[in-house]
């Protein structure tokens, strides 16, 4: 045991724990962003640009989804109309076949 101050002693395990905590503190400090205003400004600008691009991508996805949701029923509604139009055109070229289909 080592005498630190009157009535207080530090054992070897406590010294090891203290060294470990100091090492942990140093590692965490190195991992944290620097308090440099220009570095923080650059990080903020990068995050802002990233968020803007994510917002734009989400907006495009929602528009595409809306178009797909609207276009599917529209195509199903238009399909019979296209079939009727094709039959009417065929009626002009082959009246005998068209009349059988119409009856």
Image: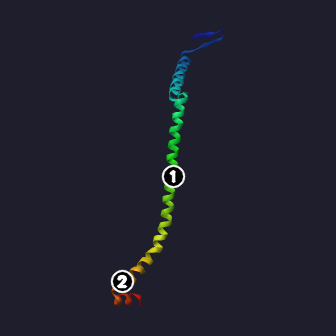
Which comes before the other along the chain, label 2 or label 1?
1
Name the residue: 34% across, 90% down: 96
| Residue 36 at x, y percent in the picture | 54, 27
Q: Secondary structure at mark 1?
A: helix
Count numbered badges in the picture.
Answer: 2
Image: 22 above or below 86: above
Image: 38 above or below 82: above
* Quadrant showing the N terminus: top right
Q: CA distance from mark 2 to mark 1?
A: 46 Å
| Residue 48 at x, y percent in the picture | 53, 41
On the image, numbered disc 1 is attached to which residue?
58
* Quadrant showing the C terminus: bottom left
Label at residue 44: none
Q: Front-most of 18 and 37?
A: 37
| Residue 18 at x, y percent in the picture | 55, 19
Q: Residues within 10 Å of mark 2 (few under 14, many from 20)?
A: some
Q: Front-most of 23 and 16?
A: 23
Name the residue: 53% across, 30% down: 38
Q: How is the image coloured?
A: rainbow
Q: Residue furthest front?
A: 92
Q: Residues within 10 Å of mark 1 (few under 14, many from 20)?
A: few
Image: 90 above or below 63: below
On the image, numbered disc 2 is attached to which residue?
90
Q: Are marks 2 and 1 in contact (CB under 8 Å)?
A: no
Name the residue: 52% across, 38% down: 45
Q: Front-most of 72 and 45?
A: 45
Image: 99 above or below 70: below
Q: Front-most of 57 and 10?
A: 57
Name the residue: 54% across, 37% down: 44
Q: Secondary structure at mark 2?
A: helix
Q: Nearer the viewer, mark 2 or mark 1?
A: 2
């Amino acid at each position: 045991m080592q005498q630190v101050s009157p009535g207080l002693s530090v054992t070897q395990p406590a010294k090891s724990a203290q060294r470990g905590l100091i090492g942990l503190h140093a590692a965490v400090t190195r991992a944290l962003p620097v308090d440099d205003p220009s570095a923080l400004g650059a990080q903020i600008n990068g995050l802002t640009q990233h968020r803007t691009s994510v917002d734009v991508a989400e907006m495009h996805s929602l528009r595409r989804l809306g178009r797909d949701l609207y276009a599917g029923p529209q195509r199903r509604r238009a399909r019979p109309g296209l079939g009727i139009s094709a039959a009417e055109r065929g009626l002009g070229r082959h009246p005998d076949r068209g009349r059988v289909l119409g009856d």
